[in-house]
Image (spheres, grey):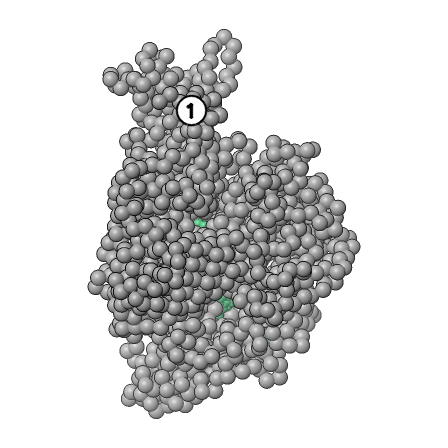
């Protein structure tokens, strides 16, 4: 086959585009997959020396705050900022009616023909996407005016001196009420409160036929209330102008995209924006998307304020202000499921009403994961006067919530062991597992049954055989009821992502990975360095990365969607392989042997056939340098290679022909105090097929770490609004309750390595799985304990006591 | 910083109202005549010993200890997370106690001895290495608060049980869920300390 | 935080004189863990003009036994009380209450005086910038009564005002069950009589009066005391309901009982019905349960806090059971 000769661009593109098939390692693993590799960020973080955006203080820096609406739905009729402007220490005030922003829409991320489209702004549900508007549709919305002052305190004081005449409007807080015909219309001019969403209806097969095939029909309802990311670092952004050059410090997962958006929004050439993205105190998706207002909006305002004030401006949010964004799984759902006596699910019909944003419809995992042929999923979203909903570790929440509850209700109705029901329905897009087997064989993957392996490992670890029982039947000696539950799904390889990076061998033989990347705590850099170490044949300790500066041009895939390593692993691997080729090329002159006769190990280049013919890498690159005062000596070009990788589009696993093959299973054991309604979690077992672990400790960190978030979401995390004013009542970390160290036991984390992932070396994502899977699991567990359903999340003592008939309401 | 000497325009003795040209003269007077030490500092002046270094500085009444240590002294290891006493991220060790810098007024900390994560790391306390080894950080934002809390525990109780470690760290929130690693890391550091001590 | 005048007081008299000068416009600050949160949020209509630091007064931090009483200085930190062998030996209710309060750091900072004098936690009241100018701030209405009242009073509002905010302290019920007295700069009174619900106030203390010490009578030999707490989290969390009990028994029967709930009413709530019920009875499941039932027979829950009635009942029961002579440690 003679292929058309590709130019350099096409070559890069061809090399970089993911090709379906097992990525088998071509090198021996020395660091990859090994424990005990020193964590890259460990010292900086343990010593308190790691810098986060919030820590940055610049000389002459001003602080900026934006007015937050005290009302859940109101319009500014008159705005008098004179007193605020006159307040000592106030340097600049930017009003919504300032010509710089008046009526200007905040544009969002890449979408449609225009690249930047307001429709795709993260606050997609907001009807008016102004940069700074005069109308609030949720309490706490930043509107009206931003001030800039010598200190945070002065800025806050100044805001209190802004006089506003508000026109208050009727509010709606419940998504189902919002769809009632008599409900007031929230958006002027609209004819209903429904948000148009093209994913409104998903159907596959014919559910009516499926119900006819069924031997049992199960119907139930479930509810999920709002929770949120509540990350550790308080978000902020810093902007500083020097002439026409802009310097920014941002707390963002996707700083390159944010730069692009800023450039489009404010007409600033991208090459004039220098962005720093330091360590980040959590992200969890909330800080992933530059089109989220709390991200994009504050960026734009900070830039404008800095220009107006002629000084660096740090726009800061306080803890309460970080609470104005909720999870995109606020849903009230009704399910109807048909099944055969052997556990085969014949049809699933669900209808959910979401508030403000539908992360995912609820049906997608059933498509990707099962052989169920007949599916019908209706997802309607309504405007309510609550903060924008968004992805929050992660957008799959509705999908796994539905899958968990559906499978548990079916197993219970049929009197079957839920692990058996899972195996009975495992598959892909309506096909049974033999379809997957065929795919695996065809593409070089091992033909292993991931779900069966996960379930076996998990059952053993939790003692399922001995301990699992019929609902409400086991009282423990301590008086509490014992409950167990299981759920499962596919892996979290979101099969998307693009990144680029360079690998450079410095003049002294040390190695640099050159690329910007945002760290959110998933220890990515250690993993990249492990890969480069093994691929290049240099010790891990000789590798360094400096990921904080966006101006190097290379940017690794942002850490969201669990696609961190999935794409970046390929990027650094390819860059290292290319660098190695260059190195051997260079060495071939010195050894007077063809490059392919040579190899590198532990930073020593040697001849494969005669290993004693060797030269330290340092010697090989002695003159390979980008810059050296070359008077009287010769130099050589630097050994620097870069690679690009793209891993398809997110959410299109099937269209691109990439079925998910790794599975996971989560097991839980609880005790319920039937007198107080308290749920005690006594054991959690997470089994994840990660394909191939690059950094085992990191994999486990995501597994036990996510467990705490998952359990918090299941039991205590809930945003609470005042019903009559729509004011968010618990916007602090005392009243919004997430897990402490003492609340739950350490999860047992088992990972399997089947090589069935589409990522580098057969790996797949792990960052989002556990936190997303665990919440729904508590519904079945509580049911198994007390024999009564509480499918209303979070499952509070109040709801448990109610289910037990201990209280009336 | 040694600006204390020019803080008060008029150097009046607080005990007998005698006036002096310089602050130093007043100090000598108070010590010799009134036999008291130390001389009350001019309003708003405090001395903090942070990681072994003495800082004398003027603070406003409303400044929190966090503001002074983080913004003024540039020790970024005290982290602002909840700003309301609910997370332990801003923990520093003050006179042996793990306390919250966001809920302390700097003006009330005159004369105190304070340690931060930076000081603990500079002193090569084994906690730091054992935290790294056990991956006891993810995003790392909460980590310095855990380290200071753990150090305060080990100072008092060099051989804690697992329960005691967990109890002591109960006031530190970690959104990333690094919780299981902390008892492991702290117990290992305690052991290293004891071994170092017995050498 | 907005600024204020600040005084590091050196004597109690100095505090009193500064307070007198400022009237309601000054506050004393002890550990500051409660007060500074309020100031940061500027939740009151009037921001304090001055703070008087009482930590700078020497000699208010102590725990000692003295003539059949336990004496505790108002500035004693909760952590020190929880760790004190004396307290753990004979005053279990107080040891447990201090051990379960707040978080380790807050206990290292928070004082017993401050814990008793702390303000309410109603989330309407605590909302920043006086967003809800409710009755308790001198405003016209209670927002919780028909609002989100899942953590509010189950025994009705205080009579004059209609405020449903519960008293949140963990140590108050323990001190009341132990029949403790509080000494102030001007008088001595039973801890039980300290609490009063007024606009901007939780105690009967005058604006120029401060708490200086607590005096707890040493319980007689066959007396046991206990403290149980129900909260959503195991630490960094206020009680949804807590309960302390002190029970003296003779020959297997209760001779005297003091039981006090908190976080269920606008003040610590003496569970007198339980005390009466237990008198002369042996401590057992059935009696403890019936005592709990008796207490909540008066409950008048609001729309969202019915579950607290059940929990209060169980807390009473468990606190009583924990006073059995060989009681295992209480579970919650
Ligand atoms: C996150 C968080 C969680 C908490 N959890 C709990 C909990 O679970 N249980 C609980 O009981 N409490 C809890 N608290 C409340 C409180 O912080 C502690 O109870 C602490 O004991 C208060 O003491 P302090 O010395 O810090 O009080 P301060 O804040 O100094 O004072 C509190 C109030 O009492 C007044 N005061 C203080 N001392 C005196 C005195 N000697 N005489 C007269 N008035 C005085 C002050 O003027 C002020 O109004 C919590 C607080 C926070 C921030
Ligand atoms: S319960 Fe009391 S403090 Fe709360 S809103 Fe009502 S009146 Fe105010
Ligand atoms: S920031 Fe101080 S306790 Fe949370
Ligand atoms: S490591 Fe991220 S909050 Fe603890």
**Where's ligand 2: which quadrant?**
bottom right
Q: Residue at x 27, y 39 (%)?
A: A441
The answer to whether A453 appears left or right of A656 in the picture is: left
Between A672 and A450, the one nearer to me in the picture: A450
Between A569 and B33, the one nearer to me in the picture: A569
Classify residue A206 by image quadrant: bottom left
Between B196 and C127, the one nearer to me in the picture: C127
Q: Position of residue B53 (x, y in %)?
A: 52, 44
Q: Position of residue A52 (x, y in %)?
A: 52, 44
Q: Residue at x 27, y 44 (%)?
A: A437
Between A569 and A347, the one nearer to me in the picture: A347
Mark 1 crowd level (few <14, some 14–19, many ≥20, 10 Å Cα)? many
Quadrant in which the N terminus of chain A is drawn = top left
Q: Residue at x 46, y 41 (%)?
A: A649
Classify residue C98 by image quadrant: bottom left
Beta carbon of the mark 1 residue lies under 8 A of ligand 4: no
Q: In the image as oriented, which residue stretches furthest toward the top?
A: A632
Which chain letter goes with mark 1?
A
Q: In the image as oriented, which residue stretches furthest toward the bottom?
A: C280
The answer to whether A464 appears left or right of A637 in the picture is: left
The answer to whether A107 appears left or right of B93 in the picture is: right
Judging from the image, what secondary structure is the residue with disc 1 in? strand
Q: Which residue is mark 1?
A: A505
Q: Position of residue C332 (x, y in %)?
A: 37, 72
Q: Position of residue A750 (x, y in %)?
A: 29, 50
């Amino acid at each position: 086959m003679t292929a058309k000769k590709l130019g350099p661009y096409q070559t890069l593109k061809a090399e970089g585009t993911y090709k379906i098939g097992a990525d088998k390692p071509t090198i021996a693993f020395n660091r990859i997959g090994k424990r005990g590799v020193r964590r890259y960020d460990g010292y900086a973080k343990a010593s308190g020396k790691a810098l986060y955006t919030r820590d940055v203080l610049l000389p002459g820096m001003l602080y900026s705050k934006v007015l937050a609406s005290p009302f859940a739905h109101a319009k500014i009729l008159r705005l008098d900022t004179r007193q605020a402007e006159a307040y000592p220490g106030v340097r600049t005030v930017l009003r919504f009616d300032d010509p710089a922003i008046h009526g200007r829409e905040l544009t969002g991320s890449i979408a449609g023909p225009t690249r930047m489209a307001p429709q795709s702004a993260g606050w997609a549900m907001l009807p008016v996407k102004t940069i700074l508007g005069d109308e609030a549709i949720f309490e706490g919305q930043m509107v009206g005016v931003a001030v800039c002052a010598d200190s945070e305190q002065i800025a806050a004081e100044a805001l209190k001196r802004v006089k506003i005449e508000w026109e208050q409007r009727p509010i709606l807080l419940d998504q189902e009420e919002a769809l009632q015909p008599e409900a007031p219309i929230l958006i002027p001019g609209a004819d209903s409160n429904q948000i148009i969403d093209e994913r409104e209806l998903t159907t596959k097969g014919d559910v009516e036929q499926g119900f006819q095939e069924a031997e049992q029909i199960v119907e139930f309802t479930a509810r999920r209330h709002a929770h949120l990311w509540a990350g550790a670092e308080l978000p902020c952004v810093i902007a500083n102008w020097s002439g026409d050059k802009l310097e920014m410090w941002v707390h963002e997962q996707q700083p390159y995209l944010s730069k692009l958006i800023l450039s489009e929004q404010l007409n600033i050439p991208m090459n004039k924006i220098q962005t720093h993205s330091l360590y980040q105190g959590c992200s969890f998706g909330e800080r992933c998307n530059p089109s989220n207002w709390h991200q994009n909006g504050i960026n734009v305002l900070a830039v404008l304020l800095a220009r107006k004030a002629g000084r660096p401006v740090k726009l800061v949010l306080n803890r309460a202000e970080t609470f104005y964004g909720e999870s995109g799984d606020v849903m009230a759902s009704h399910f109807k499921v048909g099944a055969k006596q052997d556990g085969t699910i014949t049809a699933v019909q669900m209808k959910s009403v979401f508030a403000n944003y539908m992360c995912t419809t609820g049906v997608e995992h059933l498509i990707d994961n099962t052989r169920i042929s007949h599916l019908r999923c209706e997802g309607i979203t309504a405007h309510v006067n609550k903060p924008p909903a968004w992805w929050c570790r992660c957008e799959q929440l509705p999908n796994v919530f539905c899958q968990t509850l559906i499978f548990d209700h079916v197993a219970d109705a049929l009197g079957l062991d839920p692990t058996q029901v899972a195996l009975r329905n495992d598959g892909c897009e309506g096909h049974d597992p033999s379809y997957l087997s065929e795919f695996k064989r065809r593409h070089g993957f091992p033909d292993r049954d991931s779900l069966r392996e996960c379930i076996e490992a998990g059952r053993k670890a939790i003692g399922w055989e001995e301990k699992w029982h019929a609902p409400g039947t086991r009282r423990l000696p301590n008086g509490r009821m014992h409950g167990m539950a299981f759920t499962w799904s596919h892996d979290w390889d979101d099969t998307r992502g693009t990144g680029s990076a360079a690998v450079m061998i410095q003049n002294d033989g040390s190695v640099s990975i050159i690329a910007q990347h945002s760290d959110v705590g998933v220890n990515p850099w250690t993993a990249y360095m492990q890969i480069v170490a093994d691929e290049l044949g240099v010790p891990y300790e000789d590798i360094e990365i400096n990921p904080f500066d966006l101006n190097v041009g290379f940017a690794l895939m942002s850490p969201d969607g669990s696609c961190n390593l999935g794409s970046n692993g390929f990027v650094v691997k390819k860059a290292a392989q290319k660098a190695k080729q260059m190195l051997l090329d260079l060495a071939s002159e010195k050894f007077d042997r063809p490059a392919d006769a040579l190899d590198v190990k532990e930073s020593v280049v040697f001849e494969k056939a005669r290993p004693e013919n060797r030269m330290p890498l340092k010697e090989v690159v002695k003159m390979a340098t980008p810059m050296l005062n070359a008077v009287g000596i010769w130099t050589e070009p630097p050994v620097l290679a870069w690679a690009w990788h793209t891993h398809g589009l997110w959410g299109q696993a099937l269209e691109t022909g990439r079925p998910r093959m790794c599975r996971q299973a989560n097991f839980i054991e609880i005790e319920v105090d039937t007198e107080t309604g308290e749920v005690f979690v006594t054991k959690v077992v997470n089994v994840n097929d990660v394909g191939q672990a690059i950094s085992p400790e990191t994999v486990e960190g995501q597994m036990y770490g996510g467990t705490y978030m998952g359990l918090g979401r299941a039991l205590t995390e809930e945003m609470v609004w005042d019903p009559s004013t729509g004011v968010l009542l618990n916007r602090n970390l005392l009243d919004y309750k997430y897990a402490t160290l003492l609340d739950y036991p350490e999860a047992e984390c088992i990972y399997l390595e089947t090589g069935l992932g589409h990522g580098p070396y057969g790996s797949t994502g792990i960052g989002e799985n556990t936190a997303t899977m665990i919440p729904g699991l508590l519904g079945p567990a509580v049911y198994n304990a007390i024999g009564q359903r509480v499918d209303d999340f979070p499952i509070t003592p109040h709801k448990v006591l109610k289910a037990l008939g201990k209280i009336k309401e | 910083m040694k600006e204390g000497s020019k803080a008060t325009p008029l150097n009046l003795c607080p005990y007998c109202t005698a006036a002096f040209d310089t602050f130093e003269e007043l100090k000598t007077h108070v010590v010799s005549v009134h036999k008291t030490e130390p001389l009350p500092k001019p309003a708003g002046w405090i001395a903090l010993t942070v990681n072994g270094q003495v800082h004398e500085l003027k603070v406003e009444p409303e400044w929190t200890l966090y503001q002074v240590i983080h913004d003024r002294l540039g020790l970024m290891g005290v982290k602002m997370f909840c700003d309301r006493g609910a997370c332990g991220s801003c923990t520093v060790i003050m006179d042996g106690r793990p306390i919250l810098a966001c809920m302390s007024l700097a003006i009330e900390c005159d004369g105190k001895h304070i340690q931060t994560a930076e000081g603990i790391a500079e002193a090569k306390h084994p906690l730091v290495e054992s935290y790294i080894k056990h991956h006891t950080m993810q995003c790392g934002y909460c980590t310095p608060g855990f380290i200071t809390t753990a150090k305060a525990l080990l100072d008092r109780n060099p051989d804690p049980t697992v329960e005691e470690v967990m109890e002591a760290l109960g006031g530190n929130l970690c959104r990333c869920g690094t919780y299981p690693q902390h008892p492991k890391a702290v117990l290992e550091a305690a052991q290293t300390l004891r071994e170092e001590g017995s050498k | 935080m907005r600024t204020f005048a600040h005084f590091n007081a050196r004597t109690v008299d100095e505090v009193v004189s500064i307070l007198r000068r400022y009237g309601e416009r000054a506050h004393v600050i002890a550990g500051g863990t409660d007060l500074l949160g309020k100031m940061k949020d500027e939740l009151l209509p009037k921001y304090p003009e001055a703070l008087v630091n009482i930590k700078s007064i020497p000699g208010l931090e102590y725990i000692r036994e003295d003539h059949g009483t336990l004496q505790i200085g108002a500035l004693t930190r909760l952590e020190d009380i929880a760790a004190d062998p004396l307290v753990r030996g004979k005053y279990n209710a107080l040891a447990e209450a201090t051990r379960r309060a707040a978080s380790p750091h807050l206990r290292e900072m928070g004082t017993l005086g401050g814990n008793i004098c702390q303000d309410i936690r109603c989330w309407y009241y605590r909302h920043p910038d006086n967003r809800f100018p409710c009755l308790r701030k001198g405003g016209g209405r209670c927002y919780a009564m028909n609002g989100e009242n899942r953590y509010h009073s189950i025994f009705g509002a205080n009579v004059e005002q209609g405020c449903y905010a519960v008293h949140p302290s963990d140590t108050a019920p323990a001190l009341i069950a132990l029949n403790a007295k509080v000494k102030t700069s001007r008088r001595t009174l039973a801890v039980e009589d300290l609490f009063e619900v007024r606009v901007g106030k939780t105690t009967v203390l005058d604006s120029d009066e401060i708490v200086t010490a607590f005096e707890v009578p040493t319980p007689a030999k066959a007396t046991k005391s206990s403290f149980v707490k129900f909260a959503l989290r195991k630490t960094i969390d206020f009680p949804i309901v807590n309960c302390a009990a002190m029970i003296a028994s003779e020959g297997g029967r209760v001779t005297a009982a003091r039981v006090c709930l908190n976080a269920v009413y606008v003040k610590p709530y003496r569970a007198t019905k339980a005390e009466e019920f237990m008198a002369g009875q042996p401590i057992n499941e059935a009696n403890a349960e019936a005592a709990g039932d008796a207490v909540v027979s008066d409950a008048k829950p609001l729309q969202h806090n019915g579950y607290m009635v059940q929990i209060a009942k169980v807390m009473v029961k468990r606190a009583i059971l924990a006073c059995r002579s060989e009681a295992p440690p209480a579970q919650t």
